C-alpha cells in the first residue's frame, strides 16, 4: 500500500520550486512519510516519491537562502 | 529503477524551468564577459553609460565618467489609443517640418508633439524626454514594420539634438492593448500597446472591475498570452524593439530604450511573475538588442522558460541604456515584488521606477483595506530606499521614469516626490507633458479652446519641476538641495585637480546670486532664456555651489 503522504510530499516538493513558501510543508510531509514507511515493515511504499519531494524542497530552500543572502550582500 | 530515474529527470526538468534554473542563469551573468561594441562615433551629446562603483549604487554617467542627472517629461502623443485605433495625429514627419504643427484634436487624449514643445521643455531645464511609442503603430501587420513611424521618432530625436536633450524611446502599453475589445466600464481611449494580431483574449469578456482598466479578464488573458509567448508574439515584440534599436544604433541623443511600460502580471502570481517571466523576458530583450548571449540557447516561437536567452537580432547595440520597468504590482505596493537577482552581463541597465505613492498605491486604490496613514510604512521614502537596494542587487542605475499626480495635489504628492528624488539622487521623467480634457495631469494646463495646442504652463509645476540641479559631476558623493519655495540651492562636493568639472543648471525661475566656493575656475553663462550654467572645476578638496534665495520668476498661470 502506498503512503498518501509520499505523494503529497512529491507534489509539494515540486511546487516549492515555483513557490518557495511551500518548501517547509513539503519537508514536513516527506519526513513524516519516510518515518511511517520505515516503521511499516514493508507494508507502506512510496519512499522514492517522498525522498524526491524532500530533495526538491531542500533545493528550494537552498535557492531561497542563496537569494536572500545575495540580496543582503549585494544590495 | 526506471521509475526512480524518471522522477530524478522530472525534478531536474522542473528545477530548470523554475527558480533554481533562473537563479543559476542569473548568477552566471556575473561571470559572463559583457558584450563589446566598436568605438562610439562622436555625436552631439556625450554617450551615456552606467558606472558600477564598488560598494555603491550604479549610476548613469557621461563619457568623462561623471554622474549625470536627467530631468524631463513624457509627451504621449505618439501613442495609439482605442476605440479609433489609428494614430491621433499624422505620423509623416512632413506634417511637422519647418515648425509646422497639426491642429489639436479635442477628442484626442494628448495634443500633438511639435518642435515648439521640445523648446518649451528645454526652457524648463529638461535635458531628457521619455518618448512612448506604440507597438501597434510600429508593427501594424505581423512582420511588417512601419518605417514612417520610426522616421517620426527620428524627427523628434533631431529636435532634441538641437536642444541638447536626450531621448528615451519607450515601448509603451496601457492595459496591454487598445484591441482587447469594448465592454462594460471599458474606456478604450485609455488602452494602448499591442496590435490586434498580437492580442489573444481567448473569448474572455472585456469588462472592467473595481474601476481599474487593468482589472479586466480580456486584458489579463491577453497579457498572460504575451508572457507565455503564445504564437510567437513575444518574438515579434523583440524584433520590433530591435528594429528601432538598429535605426538609432549610432545616435547618442537616444539615451536608451524602455523595454516594456508597467508590466502587468496577468493571471500570474508574484514573485514568480517577475523572476520567472518578466525579468527573463528583459534578459532576452537585452540579448536581442546587444548580442549579450546571456541565458541558455533555446527555441523561440513558443513559451521560453526563465533559463532561455535569445539570439542577437542584428542591432549589435552595446552602447545605449536599457530601461527596465518594475512590475505594475510594485508600483501599487511601493515594495519589491521580485528577488532582484542579477539580470544580464550587459552593464548599461537602468531600473525604471514608477513613483505614485499615495495615488496608485494600495492605500489610495483600496482605502477600505489600508489607510494612507498606515501605508506605505516608510512614507514616500520607502519606494526609493527599497529601489536603491533592488537596483544595486541587479547591477542597475536608478531612474524615475514616471511620476505625477493631479494638479490639485501638487503641494502634497508632487512636492514630496521631487524631494525624494533629490535625496536619492535619481533623475526623473514627469508624466505627462501635455494632456487634453478635464483632470489632465500635464505640465501645461489643457487648452481652453479646442484649436489651441495647450493651455498655459502651470505655475505650481513650473515651480516644482524647473529646478536648479547638477547635470553632471565627477564626485559620486555629491549632495545637493533645491528649495522650490525661494529658489535657493546648495551643492557640496569634493574633487581633485584635473577632475572633470561639475555642471549646475540654473533655470530662469531661480534668479538669486550664484556663489562658488573652493573651485578654482568657474564660468557662468547666461542663456538666451535667462538660464545659467555653472561650471565648477575642483582644485582639490571640498567645494560648493550656492544659489541665494530670491523671489521666483514664474511665468506660468495660477
Image (cartoon, rainbow, N blue to C red):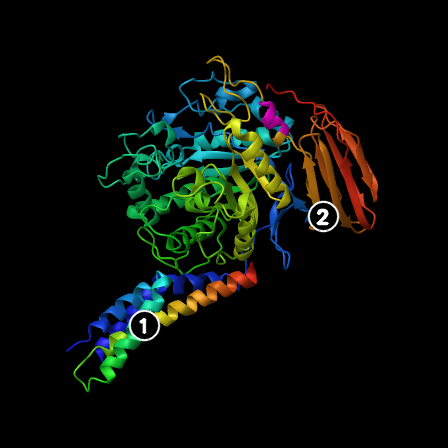
- Where does label 1 land, which residue? A28
C-alpha separation, residue under disc 2 versus residue under disc 1: 55 Å
Residue B220 locus on image (x, y percent): 31, 42
Q: Which mark is residue B474?
A: 2
Q: Nearer the viewer, residue A33 or B327?
A: A33
Report the label total. Answer: 2
**Main SS category, magenta section:** helix
Dot 2: what SS? loop
Q: Is residue B459 magenta?
A: yes
Q: How far across and how far down the image is residue A29, in percent?
A: 28, 72
Q: In the drawing, does residue B393 fall left or right of residue A50? A: right
Quarter residue A56 falls in:
bottom left
What is the secondary structure assignment of the residue under circle 1? helix
Depth-wise, is mark 2 or mark 1 nearer the camera? 1
Magenta span of residues: B458-463
- The answer for which chain carries disc 2 is B
Amino acid at each position: 500500500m502506498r503512503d498518501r503522504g509520499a505523494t503529497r510530499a512529491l507534489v509539494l516538493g515540486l511546487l516549492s520550486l515555483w513557490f518557495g513558501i511551500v518548501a517547509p510543508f513539503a519537508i514536513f510531509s516527506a519526513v513524516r512519510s519516510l518515518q511511517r514507511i520505515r516503521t511499516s515493515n514493508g507494508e507502506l511504499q512510496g519512499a522514492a516519491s517522498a525522498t524526491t519531494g524532500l530533495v526538491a524542497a531542500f533545493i528550494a530552500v537552498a535557492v531561497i537562502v542563496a537569494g536572500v543572502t545575495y540580496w543582503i550582500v549585494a544590495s | 529503477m526506471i521509475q526512480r530515474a524518471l522522477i530524478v529527470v522530472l525534478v531536474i526538468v522542473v528545477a530548470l524551468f523554475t527558480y533554481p534554473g533562473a537563479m543559476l542563469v542569473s548568477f552566471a551573468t556575473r561571470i559572463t564577459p559583457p558584450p563589446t561594441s566598436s568605438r562610439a562615433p562622436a555625436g552631439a551629446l556625450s554617450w551615456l553609460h552606467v558606472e558600477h562603483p564598488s560598494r555603491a549604487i550604479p549610476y548613469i554617467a557621461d563619457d568623462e565618467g561623471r554622474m549625470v542627472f536627467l530631468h524631463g517629461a513624457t509627451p504621449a502623443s505618439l501613442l495609439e489609443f482605442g476605440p479609433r485605433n489609428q494614430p491621433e495625429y499624422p505620423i509623416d514627419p512632413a506634417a511637422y517640418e519647418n515648425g509646422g504643427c497639426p491642429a489639436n484634436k479635442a477628442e484626442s487624449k494628448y495634443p500633438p508633439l511639435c518642435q515648439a514643445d521640445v523648446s518649451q521643455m528645454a526652457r524648463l531645464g529638461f535635458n531628457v524626454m521619455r518618448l512612448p511609442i506604440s507597438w501597434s503603430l510600429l508593427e501594424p501587420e505581423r512582420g511588417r514594420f512601419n518605417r514612417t513611424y520610426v522616421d517620426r521618432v527620428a524627427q523628434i530625436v533631431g529636435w532634441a539634438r538641437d536642444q541638447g536633450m536626450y531621448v528615451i524611446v519607450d515601448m509603451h502599453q496601457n492595459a496591454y492593448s487598445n484591441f482587447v475589445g469594448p465592454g462594460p466600464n471599458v474606456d478604450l481611449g485609455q488602452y494602448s500597446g499591442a496590435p490586434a494580431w498580437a492580442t489573444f483574449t481567448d473569448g474572455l469578456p472585456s469588462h472592467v472591475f473595481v474601476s481599474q482598466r487593468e482589472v479586466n479578464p480580456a486584458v489579463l488573458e491577453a497579457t498572460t498570452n504575451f508572457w507565455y509567448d503564445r504564437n510567437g508574439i513575444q518574438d515579434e515584440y523583440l524584433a520590433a524593439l530591435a528594429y528601432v534599436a538598429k535605426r538609432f544604433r549610432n545616435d547618442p541623443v537616444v539615451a536608451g530604450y524602455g523595454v516594456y511600460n508597467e508590466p502587468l502580471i496577468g493571471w500570474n502570481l508574484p514573485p514568480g511573475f517577475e523572476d520567472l517571466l518578466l525579468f527573463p523576458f528583459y534578459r532576452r530583450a537585452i540579448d536581442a538588442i546587444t548580442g549579450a548571449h546571456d541565458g541558455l540557447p533555446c527555441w523561440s516561437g513558443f513559451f521560453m522558460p526563465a533559463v532561455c536567452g535569445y539570439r542577437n537580432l542584428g542591432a549589435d547595440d552595446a552602447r545605449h541604456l536599457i530601461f527596465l520597468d518594475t512590475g505594475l504590482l510594485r508600483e501599487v505596493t511601493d515594495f519589491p515584488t521580485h528577488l532582484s537577482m542579477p539580470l544580464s552581463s550587459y552593464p548599461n541597465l537602468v531600473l525604471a521606477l514608477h513613483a505614485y505613492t499615495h495615488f496608485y498605491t494600495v492605500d489610495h486604490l483600496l482605502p477600505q483595506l489600508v489607510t494612507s496613514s498606515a501605508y506605505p510604512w516608510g512614507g514616500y521614502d520607502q519606494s526609493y530606499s527599497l529601489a536603491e537596494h533592488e537596483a544595486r542587487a541587479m547591477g542597475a542605475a536608478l531612474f524615475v521614469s514616471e511620476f505625477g499626480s493631479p494638479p490639485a495635489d501638487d503641494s502634497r504628492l508632487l512636492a514630496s516626490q521631487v524631494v525624494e528624488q533629490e535625496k536619492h539622487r535619481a533623475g526623473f521623467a514627469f508624466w505627462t507633458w501635455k494632456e487634453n480634457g478635464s483632470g489632465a495631469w500635464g505640465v501645461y494646463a489643457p487648452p481652453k479652446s479646442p484649436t489651441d495646442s495647450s493651455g498655459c504652463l502651470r505655475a505650481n509645476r513650473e515651480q516644482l519641476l524647473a529646478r536648479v540641479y547638477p547635470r553632471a559631476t565627477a564626485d559620486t558623493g555629491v549632495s545637493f538641495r533645491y528649495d522650490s519655495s525661494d529658489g535657493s540651492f546648495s551643492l557640496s562636493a569634493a574633487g581633485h585637480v584635473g577632475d572633470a568639472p561639475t555642471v549646475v543648471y540654473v533655470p530662469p525661475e531661480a534668479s538669486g546670486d550664484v556663489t562658488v566656493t573652493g573651485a578654482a575656475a568657474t564660468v557662468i553663462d547666461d542663456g538666451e532664456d535667462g538660464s545659467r550654467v555653472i561650471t565648477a572645476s575642483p582644485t582639490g578638496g571640498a567645494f560648493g555651489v550656492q544659489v541665494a534665495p530670491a523671489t521666483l520668476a514664474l511665468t506660468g498661470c495660477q
